[in-house]
Amino acid sequence: MTVRFADRVVLADTSLTVADGEVVALLGPSGSGKSTLLRVISGLLVPDSGDILVDGVVITALPTHRRSIGFVFQDEQLFPHRSVAANVEFGLRMSGWTKARRAERRNELLALVGLDGFADRRVTDLSGGEAKRVALARTLAPSPRIVLLDEPLTGLDRDLHDQLAAEVAKLLRATGTTALVVTHDRDEAAIIDDRVVALADL
């Protein structure tokens, strides 16, 4: 695919294949187009040329909500006026899940990310690490086919960063999730991912 912003080419004939269940790290300097690539895959940006295929099916024209692609943003983008439970259940509610099914799935995900008992907490009362866990639980709750993570551990101190990197790696594999992780941290990539790709090589 190719993506331009005005006269600037951000991605030029970029091509990437990720296998089912594979976790791939995408490395590159700031401004190299890593986040742009995730936004195109998710449907938040339209490429100037090229297509996105999932299981051989072109999804380039599909709206974001029909792609079954989860997105963990760098700044979490949690809903500050909602509880942890309401944040995790958001995608399930939009998909028409019953209250009982939503609660069961929410509890399952909170247990997976180590936040049992946090359902009624206000997200504004969470620590940085807890907020990132909630963002991951919310993204995984609807069982998306693909998860995109845009520098998901930015802003954490080194010890917590490394602890969460190991937890994210374990969680993605436990759920069999296909994922593309944008990072500038080679150590983080080595912990989380099956394969590391430099954007300059695409």
Image (cartoon, grey):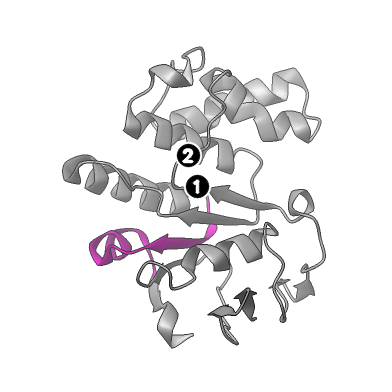
Range covered by the magenta-colored residues: 174-194
Position of 47 with respect to 66 (left or right) is left
Q: For the point 57% across and 50% down, which residue is it?
A: 71
Foreground pick, 37 / 120:
37
- Give the answer, above or below, for where 137 lies relative to 172: above
Secondary structure type for disc 2: loop
Q: Which residue is mark 1?
A: 73
Assess whether residue 71 is covered by the magenta stretch. Answer: no
Distance CA(mark 2)–CA(mark 1): 5 Å
Q: Could you tell me which residue is drawn at 61 percent across and 38 percent down?
A: 141
The answer to whether one can see residue 188 in this image is yes
Kindly indicate the quadrant of the structure image that contains residue 108: top right
Disc 2: CA contacts within 10 A as few (<14), some (14-19) or many (>=20): some
Q: Position of residue 144 (x, y in %)?
A: 65, 50
Among all residues in the image, which is located at the extreme front?
A: 7
Q: Are marks 2 and 1 in contact (CB under 8 Å)?
A: yes
Q: Is residue 90 left or right of residue 177?
A: right
Q: Nearer the viewer, residue 171 or 93?
A: 93
Does the magenta-highlighted stretch encompass residue 181?
yes
Kindly identify which residue carries mark 2.
76
